[in-house]
Amino acid sequence: MSEIEGKVVVITGASSGIGKATALLLAERGAKIVLGARSEDRLEALAARITDAGGEAVYAPTDVRRREDLSNLVTLACERFGQLDVLVNNAGIGPISPLDDLRVEDWEAMIDVNIKGVLYGIAAALPIFREQGFGQFVNTSSVAAHQTTPNMAVYSGTKMAVGAISEGLRQEAGDKLRVTIISPGFTQTPFIESVPNEEVKAQLVKSREAFGMPPEAIARSIVFAIEQPAGVDVGEIVVRPTAQG
């Protein structure tokens, strides 16, 4: 029996991109998957795909900006499968733009999803992990947390916050809980579609075509972190493309 088989894993942002790829790979390895995202139609289709292949999956529409949605998602995992082994805080957005554009609502949205969404996930799962005596957080950050570039100041700031929160949680967690940060480089996801500045979007499309990684590459890193045996905690995995154009 592998370290993955039978584990109950909640994934936010599960309807596409990294979240979807992670759900499929974990289900293939025998995990029980609890899917959360805003798109109910996509969640339903993904859950059906997993169950049709012989896996186990349930879902609930989840907006990580709403604390009660995260609580409900975690409750669903416990009610349906009896425990919670891993929470993958994966939901994130990136409507990046130059600061001069003053897209303050986009700044606020990134803070709400990328930072507060992670905190709400922690608030939902941490008491359960403490009561169980085991559990793992896998929080999706970005290489942008380590290197800020033009147009990405606010996005980078939110991902730096994910790193700081995760590291603080790791230091408080003790020896029963695990905390892993996944920091992907440029990945082929719907991320670009939310970029409002057309010039910036065109640059990103060009970069994606040149060296964007498939989401399955990030999913494999998440699975690697989860499949480590008890007592082994992978602190951070940075996933970069092998070449950049």
Image (tube, grey):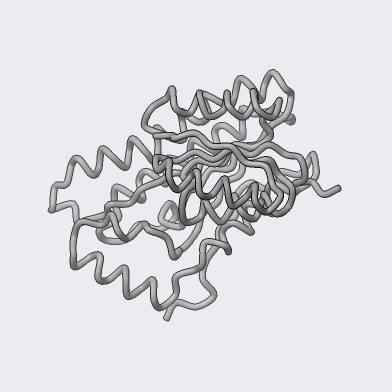
* View extreme (right): residue: 1
Q: Position of residue 28 (x, y in %)?
A: 70, 54
Q: Is residue 80 above or below residue 220?
A: above
Q: Is residue 29 above or below residue 83?
A: below
Q: Is residue 178 visible?
A: no
Pick the residue in front: 144 or 20.
Answer: 20
Q: Quadrant of residue 237?
A: bottom right
Q: Quadrant of the C terminus?
A: bottom left
Pick the residue in front: 6 or 161.
Answer: 6
Residue displayed at 46% across by 57% down: 143
Q: Position of residue 210 (x, y in %)?
A: 40, 78
Q: Position of residue 129 (x, y in %)?
A: 66, 25
Residue displayed at 57% across by 45% down: 47
Residue displayed at 50% across by 31% down: 121
Pick the residue in front: 97 or 38.
Answer: 38
* View extreme (left): residue: 101
Residue displayed at 53% across by 49% down: 46
Q: Is residue 11 left or right of residue 13?
A: right
Q: How many discs mark residues in the rendered view?
A: 0
Q: Position of residue 183 (x, y in %)?
A: 51, 54
Q: Is residue 18 left or right of residue 231?
A: left
Q: Is residue 72 visible?
A: yes
* View extreme (bottom): residue: 245
